[in-house]
């Protein structure tokens, strides 16, 4: 009897919360965190070094564009231990790196800005229950 070979799993489509009000850098960080989860890595460098990554993960054109446009931020994201994420303002667009416990919601990144801070989530969106 021949040995059974494992079937190759199809790539998983990366899904994140679709928050168009979040700054692009925050949206890119959320996509990167989801890719790191699927790649089972704690840093972006480890994820992109995985030769199997493109066989396991599928991105939309928009997601790929967001990652490309914000590629300077991605190496600083950390998913395990002290989680390092991105917090950005929805009005002025400035951002900072922060731990996952950052709770400030009013922008203090630009003098006089009245925007709200949005934090990149490190967890995927929850599936909605059918009603």
Image: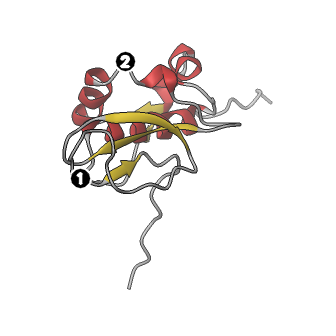
Name the residue beneath numbered marker 2: 72
Residue 9 shows up from this direction: no
Coordinates of residue 125 in the picture (x, y in percent): 44, 58
How far, Cα to Cα, is label 2 from label 1?
24 Å
Exactly how many numbered labels are in the figure?
2
For mark 1, give the secondary structure: loop
Residue 47 image-quadrant placement: top right
Please state if 50 lies on the left or on the right of 121 as rendered: right
> Residue at image x 45%, y 65%?
127
- Mark 2 neighbour class, 10 Å CA radius: few under 14, some 14 to 19, many 20 or more: few
Coordinates of residue 75 in the picture (x, y in percent): 49, 20
Residue 61 shows up from this direction: yes
Q: In this orientation, which residue lies closer to the viewer: 83 or 101?
A: 101
Please state if 77 lies on the left or on the right of 16 as rendered: right
Residue 115 — which label?
1
Coordinates of residue 130 in the picture (x, y in percent): 40, 79
For mark 2, give the secondary structure: loop
> Residue at image x 21%, y 54%?
114
Could you tell me if the residues under marks 2 and 1 are in contact, i.e. CB atoms within 8 Å? Answer: no
Q: In this orientation, which residue lies closer to the viewer: 31 or 113?
A: 113
Residue 89 position (above or below residue 47): below
- Point out the image quarter for the C terminus: bottom left
> Residue at image x 63%, y 29%?
41
Name the mark nearer the viewer: 2 or 1.
Answer: 1
- Of the numbered discs 2 and 1, the one sitting upstream in the chain is 2
Q: In this orientation, which residue lies closer to the viewer: 1 or 43?
A: 43
Please state if 69 lies on the left or on the right of 2 as rendered: left
């Amino acid at each position: 009897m021949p040995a059974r070979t494992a079937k190759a799993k199809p790539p998983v489509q990366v899904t994140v919360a679709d928050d168009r009000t979040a700054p692009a850098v925050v949206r890119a960080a959320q996509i990167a965190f989801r890719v790191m989860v699927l790649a089972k890595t704690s840093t972006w460098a480890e994820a992109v070094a995985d030769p199997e990554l493109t066989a396991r993960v599928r991105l939309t054109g928009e997601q790929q564009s967001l990652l490309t446009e914000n590629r300077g931020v991605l190496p600083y994201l950390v998913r395990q231990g002290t989680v390092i994420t991105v917090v950005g303002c929805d009005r002025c667009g400035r951002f900072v790196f922060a731990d996952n416990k950052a709770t400030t919601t009013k922008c203090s990144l630009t003098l006089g800005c009245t925007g709200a801070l949005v934090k990149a989530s490190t967890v995927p969106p929850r599936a909605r229950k059918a009603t």
